[in-house]
Amino acid sequence: MTKNLKPHYLLILISTLKMIATLLVFFALAILLSPNKYYTALNLIKMLLPVVVLIYAYMFYFWHSVTINITAEKLDFNMTAGRQNHIEILYSDMETLTLKQGFLEKMFGVSRISITIKNVEKTYGGKIMILDQYMVFKTIKAEEISRIITENMNITLKNGPKY
């Protein structure tokens, strides 16, 4: 049994909203610290839209290139963009699987699947962080994926922190 999946399209929106919120904090600091607040605010507002469009295009490009395959013995993460093109995680290397929902994820009805790996540094290094970033699905589908993985391997399923 192989399941070919794509991360939820709201992943792009959630990531973009988080980056916009960060930019707005920096913009607010720049306006507060500048002597000419009106001029600074006007220029920052003019700059905000192109930056948001670039961030969204960047996120869409990477989201579009991701596919996740779940087989009976492993989880395959394939990306046609970026440096980490292929990540293969055997179920025997998995320690725990956690379903997480932050504030924005809960608002949009999606869940993030976080996987804890045995011997992370030796086998997978920083690849697991890339996988965590893209494992966002509709809550029902995330529960189904976690059920499939836990059935194929005896790992523990945890529910993440409630926000």
Image (cartoon, helix red, strand yellow):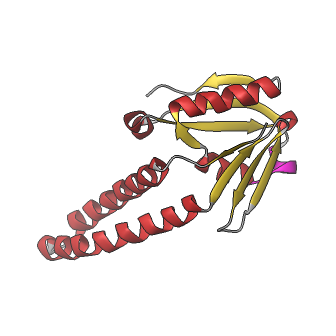
Q: Does residue 61 sit above or below 47 in this rendering?
A: above
- The picture quadrant where one finds residue 48 is bottom left
Residue 66 showing in the rendered view? yes
Which residue sits furthest left? Answer: 38
Q: Which residues are magenta?
A: 120-126
- Res 155 seen here: no
Viewer-nearest residue: 123 or 131: 131
Q: Quadrant of the N terminus?
A: top right
Quadrant location of the C terminus in the rendered image: top left
Counting from the top left corner in percent of width and height, residue 43 is at 22, 77
Q: Residue at 62%, 37% (x, y): give it.
A: 113
Q: Which x, y percent locates residue 11?
A: 49, 49
Q: Residue at x 74, y 22 (%)?
A: 156
* The quarter of the displayed image where residue 72 is located: top right
**Magenta-drawn stretch contains 41:** no
Q: Is residue 40 above or below residue 96?
A: below
Q: Is residue 48 left or right of residue 100?
A: left
Outermost front residue: 1
Using the image, determine if residue 84 lies above or below residue 117.
below
Residue 146, horizontal then vertical, whole percent? 67, 29
Residue drawn at (69%, 23%) of the image: 157
The verdict on residue 124 being magenta is yes
User: Residue 39: horizontal and vertical position, in percent?
Assistant: 15, 77
Q: How many marks?
A: 0
